[in-house]
Amino acid sequence: MKTPLDFYFDFSSPYGYLASHKIEALAARHGRTVKWRPMLLGAAFKATGAAPLPLIPLKGDYAKRDFERSARFHGVQFRIPEPFPVSTVPACRAFYWLSDEKQQVTLAKALYRAYFVDNINIGEPENVIKVAASVGARPDINDQAVKDRTRAEVEAAIAKGVFGSPYIVVDGEPFWGIDRFDQIERWLKGPF
Amino acid sequence: MKTPLDFYFDFSSPYGYLASHKIEALAARHGRTVKWRPMLLGAAFKATGAAPLPLIPLKGDYAKRDFERSARFHGVQFRIPEPFPVSTVPACRAFYWLSDEKQQVTLAKALYRAYFVDNINIGEPENVIKVAASVGARPDINDQAVKDRTRAEVEAAIAKGVFGSPYIVVDGEPFWGIDRFDQIERWLKGPF
């Protein structure tokens, strides 16, 4: 039994969103599955001293252009939402409130689509609840247990070295960015 | 006459080094040439607030692993030099002291090889002079004119938005990173 690919991502990350369209097919080509693991980029940024891309001089302007060009390159529908970025705490908690993996993935895709296609502000808890309802889920994101679980998942991710989105771990080997999918593809044929 | 690709890079940048092995063939496949434009990443980092990768928590450990894996992926001989990174002011000045483009490129490749293959500290002016001598160049890196020209080139790069290495501009379209070479390849067939 081959181990699944660990797919770490933040719900406000354009590159994470693009990766979400590609990762399952990538894994399937090599007989693998994907374990979706949303995390909070803001918490990772505290560890690395990074800031959201749009706020960085020079790099911010480039990033907006690269988000849109990369979406066209990968053939994925995309618009830069307004506001951007947003807090992804409510989205993350909604995901971890669910225990069924299939439901989790369905919700993750719906949240990404809401934000990056339909321009719905998923930083607002009520919008997360609406998106969840649209796929048949009724998460209680104020539940203490789900708050604790979300925090634990994010801390575990950072403890494993996750500092960006998307961040994919294949049999212990870490890959940061959708632009490492070419290396992941080769790695899945055998470490190089 | 098609315009050349503007290839901005820093002499202490592993990804710039890897790109230096790939960019001429990439350009040639599309009937283009390459204008080599060394810059000083340290100056760009002042504008963006960035720090050298190895110094960043979490990201630094990943970066070292990714440098080596990316070199293997691209089939380029590479080792992480010691010390790393180093000041690239002497290397940059030696490059701009030359006026012949072919000589400039020969020197650039020799400096990159010295640092990332032979572990020669090109942060030391005397080592830059030795590497230059090995390709028949005798730059005067203390010459005021070359200091001024280097400063002007670096300022011009930052004014154009260059914040990283490698950074390639194709007919006005900017691409950051060797991991955008796939997008550059497609762009050269026609903007998308």
Image (cartoon, coloured by chain):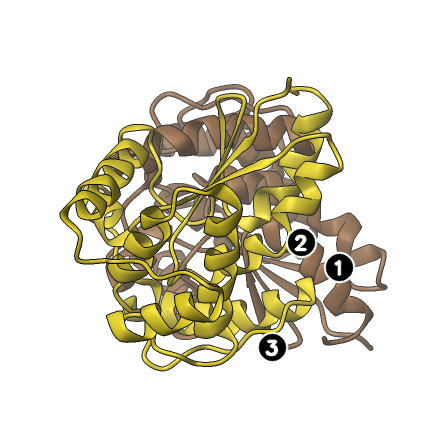
Chain colours: A brown, B yellow
Let me know if marks 3 and 2 both belong to one chain. yes
B45 or A156: nearer the viewer: B45
Subunit of label 2: A
Residue located beneath label 2 in the image: A181
Q: Which residue occupies the extreme left position in the image?
A: B144
Separation (CA) of disc 1 from disc 2: 6 Å
Subunit under mark 3? A
Q: Judge whether residue A161 can be spotted in this image.
A: no
Instruction: Identify which amino acid the numbered label 2 is placed on.
Output: Phe
Whether labels 1 and 2 belong to a single chain: the reply is yes
Of the residues shown, which amino acid type is indicated by label 3?
Gly
Q: Name the residue under label 1.
A: A185
- Mark 3 or mark 1, which is nearer the start of the sequence? 3
Q: Are marks 1 and 2 in contact (CB under 8 Å)?
A: yes
Which element carries disc 2, helix, strand or loop? helix
Residue at 17% x, 58% y is B142
In which quadrant of the rendered image does the N terminus of chain A lie? bottom right
Q: Where is residue A139 in the image (x, y as percent from the top left)?
A: 48, 44
Q: Nearer the viewer, residue B86 or B153?
A: B153
